Image (cartoon, helix red, strand yellow):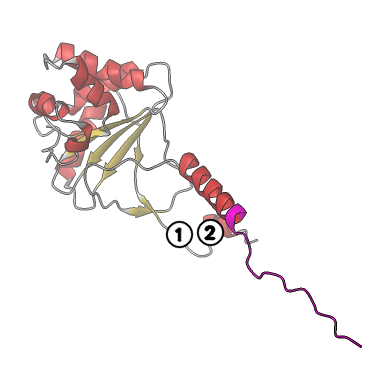
Amino acid sequence: MPSVKIPRKSTENDMTPFVDIAFLILSFFIMATKMKPPEPVQITTPNSVSTKELPANDAVMVELDGKGRVFFTMLVENDPEAKMSVISNLNTTRNLGLTQAEMNNFVKSVSIGVPFTQLKSLLSQPLENQKNVLQSGIPVRDSANNELTFWIRDAVTSLAGKKINYLIKGDNAALYPDFKNVLDAFKKNDIYKFQLVTSPEDAPVGSALYKTRNQIK
């Protein structure tokens, strides 16, 4: 009886569909992921246990590093006109002499940490070069001319009618007098409630928050 020959089949598989799917998934995550904006200065915040997440919009944040430098940030992703309103008003009231292009740079920038006298020089730089500029910090130590007061004042005005979240992010090494000067800028604008930005840590074992997070009865 003649032997039956089993037809030989190729062991190669066409991976093209799998590669296409992988690129589609990768493209989806790239498009959907919200990138964290670059920070103007490295700040090591104290740890705390908290259930609240930081607001991503309609927020005013003041950062204080270990050397006492102060930076101002407006988190208004959905309202760029609010930032334009701030810089336009400061340009008029503080006689900054900014051009429209420089004010547009402010709207696109992340944080500001220079005196008014240096603001034009900073904003005249292309955005990609601003991160290389060493910013000396917004002056706050002179109580008679605490420039942070004006930044907060105009931010409050530009966000009128909205619930504003006020955030203070201070370094562990920051000194109390510098922190107090930041608080004075808020107080001069009748702002007494704010959130401190900290690094999250686990709740103590056995606490109510620990049981809630771990669903322990």
Viewer-proximal residue among 67 and 31? 31
Determine the CA span between mark 1 and mark 2: 8 Å
Q: Quadrant of the C terminus?
A: bottom right
Taking 208 as reference, is 45 left or right?
A: left
Identity, as a three-letter code, of the amino acid under mark 1: Asp
Disc 1 and disc 2 in contact, CB within 8 angstroms:
yes
Q: Residue furthest top?
A: 92
Residue drawn at the location 43% of the way across and 24% of the way down: 163
The answer to which of 94 and 10 lies nearer the viewer is 10
Task: Give the magenta range.
Answer: 1-17
N-terminal label among 1 and 2: 1
Residue name at image x 34 percent, y 18 percent: 81
Label 2 neighbourhood size at 10 Å, few (<14), some (14-19), many (20+)? some
Q: Residue at x 52, y 60 (%)?
A: 207
Q: Name the residue type under label 2.
A: Tyr
- Nearest the viewer among 49 and 187 is 49
Where residue 82 sits: x, y (%)?
A: 34, 19
The residue indicated by pointer 1 is: 202
**Number of the label disc, if any, that sits on residue 118:** none
Q: Label 1 crowding class (10 Å Cα cut-off): few <14, some 14-19, many 20+?
A: few
What residue did someone put label 2 on? 210
Quarter that holds the N terminus? bottom right
Q: Is residue 184 left or right of residue 10?
A: left
Question: Is residue 189 something that shows in the picture?
Answer: no
- Local secondary structure at mark 1: loop
Residue 73: % across, % down: 28, 32
